Amino acid sequence: MPRTNIIQHNAPLADRMRPKTLNDFVGQENIIGSGKILRQAIKGDNVPSIIFWGPPGCGKTTLARIIAGATNSEFLQLSAVMSGVKDIRAAVAKAKDLQAVNKRTILFIDEIHRFNKSQQDSLLPYVENGTITLIGATTENPSFEVISALLSRCRVFILEKLTAEHIKALAERALNSVPELKNVKIEDEALQFLCEMSDGDARVALNALEFASRTARTRTDLNADKHESRIIINRGRIEDALQKSLMYDKAGEEHYNIISALHKSMRGSDADAALYYLARMLEGGEDPLYIARRLIRFASEDIGIANSYALEQAVAAYNACHYIGMPECSVNLAQAVVYMAKSKKSNELYAAYGKAQADVKQYGALPVPLHIRNAPTKLMKELNYGKGYKYSPEYGYKEKQEYLPPQIKNHRYLT
């Protein structure tokens, strides 16, 4: 067998099942359906730089590869997790060589949100002058994770989570076309479970199907029909293949959805819901210290001066997580979460700081009033630094003097 075929055969099923044309692509009718702008751009070989924003396993990488093939462009791929400016420069150098012979280059950057500002900045001139056509893929909101200068030079396309029907179509295609799966039969209940529990992630679904089929081949208790030489995959086998990776995605959008749900449940004083979302995160493998840090923030943002002990409770939970780790610290976090949910609430501090922050942005760096400036040197005293300052203890803390700059002296942040 040729080496390339061996590599392809050993690749995960999800990689082997990547469609190579738009006609074979499943899902995302909202952007590549008949008459849609992206489909027209691909057909017209006029694809701009793009940011694909969507959940894991919805087809971002596959669509980028299809675009490269359809437009006869060189396809270069970088992972923002593993790459840096040096890799970007190497890709650009290759793109310049190809540009000299009138060949376009598509530079696909997976998880582009992982690039820091300087790394993203390094792409700008080459996107702007057309050396590369950038296609970035992200599971995070590009408005927050991609610098504005780069974002303004790209067209953002939102990819939707695949439906259960989309997943079913992909699974059935694999069963009918992949040689090692042709003798595998999956029960209807198991297939439906796979489609629903993969949560729109084609990669998870296909790799779980492959794992289930491979483990079935090595066991004798999986209902093999000897007459038809077929292996039956039941729901239990799919459950084992999926395991708990589907419960919670630490890297994707669901990570933020669930921490948001935890935060809002505590804010709404629903301790039961808060415990549920805490369990979702911990059982899914979330770092308990991350959760504890969020509780520290919550204690000041949503409870604040209504209950000063909340911050102590959150810090104590963080220390407990640090000292004993999982699984023992789960009960410490549960205690803190329930305490936060049942505590009196006040966002006065949060709102007040927001007003002060807005004044800083609106008025800039206003000069500090002279009378409350520090005056450690003779020159500073000659410049009237500290002149007229009233030392509060000498006035029984009842002295009247201005502390805010004159431009905002009447502004009040706390109610």
Image (cartoon, rainbow, N blue to C red):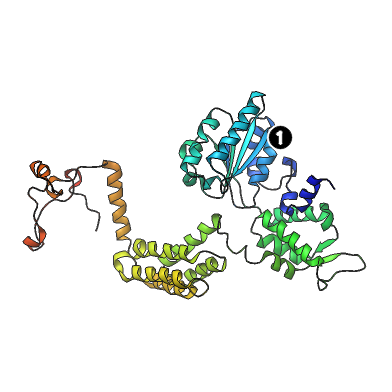
Dividing the picture into quarters, in which one does residue 68 lie?
top right
Residue 140 place in picture, x, y as percent: 53, 49
Which x, y percent locates residue 145?
49, 46
Please say whether residue 166 is visible from this viewpoint: yes
Residue 263 on image: x %, y %: 44, 63
Q: Is residue 190 above or below residue 53?
A: below
Looking at the image, residue 167 sits to the left or right of residue 384; the answer is right
Residue 347 relative to residue 252: left or right? left
Q: Mark 1 — residue?
A: 70
Q: Residue at x 26, y 41 (%)?
A: 363
Q: Is residue 37 above or below residue 387?
A: above
Q: Nearer the viewer, residue 116 or 310?
A: 116
Q: Is residue 133 visible?
A: no
Residue closest to the eye, 402 or 411: 402
- Near mark 1 (Cα within 10 A), the count class, few <14, some 14-19 or many ≥20, is some
Q: Is residue 403 left or right of residue 84?
A: left
Which residue is depicted at the point 55% across and 45% down? 112
Residue type highlighted by circle 1 = Ala
Q: Quadrant of the C terminus?
A: bottom left
